[in-house]
Image (spheres, rainbow, N blue to C red):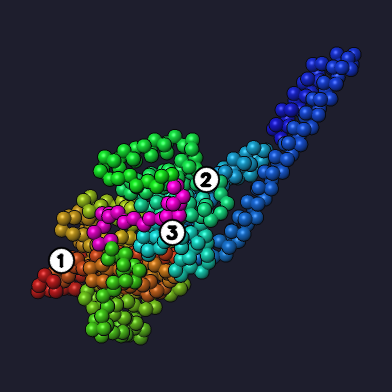
């Protein structure tokens, strides 16, 4: 409409300026006829452009209407699928902004105003990047190949949600921008493969090859980098950087004393070739054992050990509140002793705790071992909230139940922490207690070290999300309403280093937990010291 207004304004200005002369000169008036014809032509082009835009917007609306109908029917279940979570981030952070640019070309003030207001709640680039990295974390932990993820074939997933060529390309770019060339190769290869299979996309092979060839070089495969760069030049002969890179790669190969085995312009030979490179090491020394346990591999449960595990009714030495309704206690591990309590929380209690926590959920923190200050960390990816003991009768009742079951004083314990692990949510191997070198970890609390951990599972998890102990090879799986309990310290107060544990990434679903960290103070008579360091 803006363009039309400009044309009409020019038209009427022209008439106003020349009308006296036009009445006396037919020849000059014919100019107005051609001006009008040009305006009609412009009007038709404007209408055609607007109709094209409206068609595109309608297509968007229909697609998003179907998506939101599915997503709102079960929000947590929908977001429990990591691809859904990633694509939601991508849509809101990137694709809705493209729609905004499209609509801004016409007068749609109401929509733009609403979109501008709502955009304050949209995810950021960092959020979209985080969701992409979560996909890669799941890929590594559960040994999922890029094609399986792209086609939506995830263990435990009820629905198949594929990734497009553009999705794969964007995942590769997220990795590339993080200097993660290992995952860049995996996802650029997948994007290229889907392009070769004929999937429609605005993405070109040259764009994918550009990222792929350089990332392969960074992985140390110079010969393949040369092959891919040659293929890039074949696709786009004007690509100056590719020509420069090819010259550099060849010189590098020559300087390294390796023969150039390029296939004499046989660019297509490496066209479908895909290489799988060794995943780079990281700071986590027990990464392999931790991830194996997350996959259900390497669990050191033997028949002999299983024979020492029992189920029983637990009333904590005839505690008054447990005599009539004792807890169902099941041994999960013998040494260190880990037990699971069944029917610890009712569905109503779980929903109430989640209701109280949801408005306060924020990025989960850990205590800095040097300062004792709570801070966020890349190795803990979840959102958490702390509930005061007097927050609600349900919280007070759960805390009292924990004290009844364990026989430990909870007045000196930390508040009930509620955590939600979404797409790729995890907590890498860690100790709950502070080590000797961490003098000030709990100094501000004044209640000593974390003696024990009581962990409530408040949801079932279709795939992933196990609590694993790499030191002795145990994996404990979430089961809604149950809780697990273990001591972090020996009776002497020394830390039990075997209790180093991790929360595996959630592959499918949403994991809700709440935990109570019970401290040393107040336990002097409830759990007396032993005679040796490891009693």
Marks 3 and 1, the one that precedes in the sequence: 3
Q: Earlier in the sequence, mark 2 or mark 3?
A: 3
Real-space Cα separation, disc 2 to disc 1, in angstroms: 60 Å
Quarter of the image containing the C terminus?
Answer: bottom left
Range of the magenta residues?
266-287
Q: Nearer the viewer, mark 2 or mark 1?
A: 2
* Residue sitting at the far left: 531
In the picture of the structure, the residue carrying the numbered disc 3 is 146
| Nearer to us: label 3 or label 1 | 3
Residue 433 within the magenta-colored segment of the rendering? no
Residue 86 visible within the image? yes
For mark 2, give the secondary structure: loop
Place residue 518 in its image quadrant.
Answer: bottom left
- Depth check, front residue: 122 or 58: 58
Q: Residue 494 carries which label?
A: 1
Contact check, label 2 and label 1, Cβ < 8 Å: no
In this view of the protein, which residue sits in the foreground, 30 or 469?
30
What is the quadrant of the N terminus in the image? top right
Residue lying at 50% horizontally and 43% vertically, measured from the top left:
235
Which residue shows up at 27% across the image and 54% down it? Answer: 282
Mark 2–mark 3 distance (CA, rounded to whole Å): 19 Å
Neighbour tally class for label 3: few under 14, some 14-19, many 20 plus, Cα within 10 Å: many
To which residue does mark 2 refer? Answer: 204
- Residue at image point 29% right, 77% down: 332
User: Secondary structure under badge 1?
Assistant: loop
* Mark sitting earlier along the chain (2/1): 2
**Residue nearest the observer in this picture, 160 or 428:** 160
| Location of residue 472 by image quarter | bottom left
Label 3: element kind: helix
């Amino acid at each position: 409409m803006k363009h039309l207004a400009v044309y009409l304004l020019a038209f009427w200005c022209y008439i106003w300026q020349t009308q006296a002369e036009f009445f006396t000169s037919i020849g000059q008036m014919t100019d107005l006829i051609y001006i009008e014809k040009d305006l009609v032509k412009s009007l038709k082009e404007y209408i055609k452009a607007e109709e094209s835009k409206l068609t595109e917007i309608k297509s968007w609306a229909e697609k998003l209407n179907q998506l939101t109908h599915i997503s709102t029917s079960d929000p947590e279940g929908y977001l429990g699928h990591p691809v859904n979570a990633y694509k939601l981030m991508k849509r809101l952070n990137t694709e809705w902004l493209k729609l905004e640019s499209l609509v801004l070309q016409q007068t749609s003030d109401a929509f733009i105003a609403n979109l501008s207001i709502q955009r304050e709640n949209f995810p950021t680039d960092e959020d979209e990047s985080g969701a992409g990295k979560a996909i890669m974390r799941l890929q590594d932990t559960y040994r999922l190949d890029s094609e399986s993820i792209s086609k939506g074939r995830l263990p435990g997933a009820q629905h198949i949600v594929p990734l497009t060529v553009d999705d794969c390309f964007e995942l590769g770019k997220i990795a590339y921008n993080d200097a993660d060339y290992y995952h860049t190769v995996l996802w650029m290869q997948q994007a290229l493969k889907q392009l070769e299979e004929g999937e429609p996309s605005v993405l070109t092979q040259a764009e994918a090859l550009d990222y792929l060839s350089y990332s392969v070089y960074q992985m140390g495969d110079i010969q393949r980098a040369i092959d891919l760069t040659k293929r890039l030049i074949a696709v786009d002969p004007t690509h100056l950087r590719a020509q420069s890179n090819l010259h550099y790669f060849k010189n590098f190969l020559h300087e390294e004393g390796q023969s150039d085995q390029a296939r004499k312009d046989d660019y297509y030979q490496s066209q479908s070739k895909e290489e799988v490179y060794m995943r780079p090491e990281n700071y986590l020394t027990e990464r392999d054992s931790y991830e194996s346990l997350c996959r259900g591999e390497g669990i050191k449960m033997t028949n002999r050990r299983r024979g020492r595990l029992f189920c029983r009714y637990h009333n904590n030495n005839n505690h008054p509140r447990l005599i009539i309704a004792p807890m169902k206690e099941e041994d999960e591990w013998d040494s260190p002793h880990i037990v699971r309590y069944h029917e610890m929380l009712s569905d109503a209690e779980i929903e109430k705790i989640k209701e109280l926590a949801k408005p306060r959920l924020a990025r989960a923190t850990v205590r800095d071992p040097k300062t004792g200050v709570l801070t966020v960390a890349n190795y803990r990816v979840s959102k958490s909230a702390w509930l005061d003991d007097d927050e609600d009768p349900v919280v007070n009742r759960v805390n009292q139940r924990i004290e009844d079951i364990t026989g430990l004083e909870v007045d000196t314990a930390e508040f009930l922490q509620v955590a939600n692990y979404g797409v790729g949510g995890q907590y890498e191997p860690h100790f709950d207690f502070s080590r000797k070198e961490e003098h000030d970890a709990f100094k501000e609390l004044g209640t000593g070290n974390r003696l024990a951990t009581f962990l409530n599972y408040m949801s079932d998890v279709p795939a992933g999300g196990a609590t694993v102990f790499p030191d002795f090879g145990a994996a404990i799986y979430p089961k809604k309403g149950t809780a697990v309990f273990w001591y972090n310290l020996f009776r002497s107060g020394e830390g039990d280093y075997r209790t180093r544990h991790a929360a595996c990434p959630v592959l499918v679903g949403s994991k809700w937990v709440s935990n109570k960290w019970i401290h040393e103070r107040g336990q002097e008579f409830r759990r007396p010291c032993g005679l040796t360091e490891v009693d």
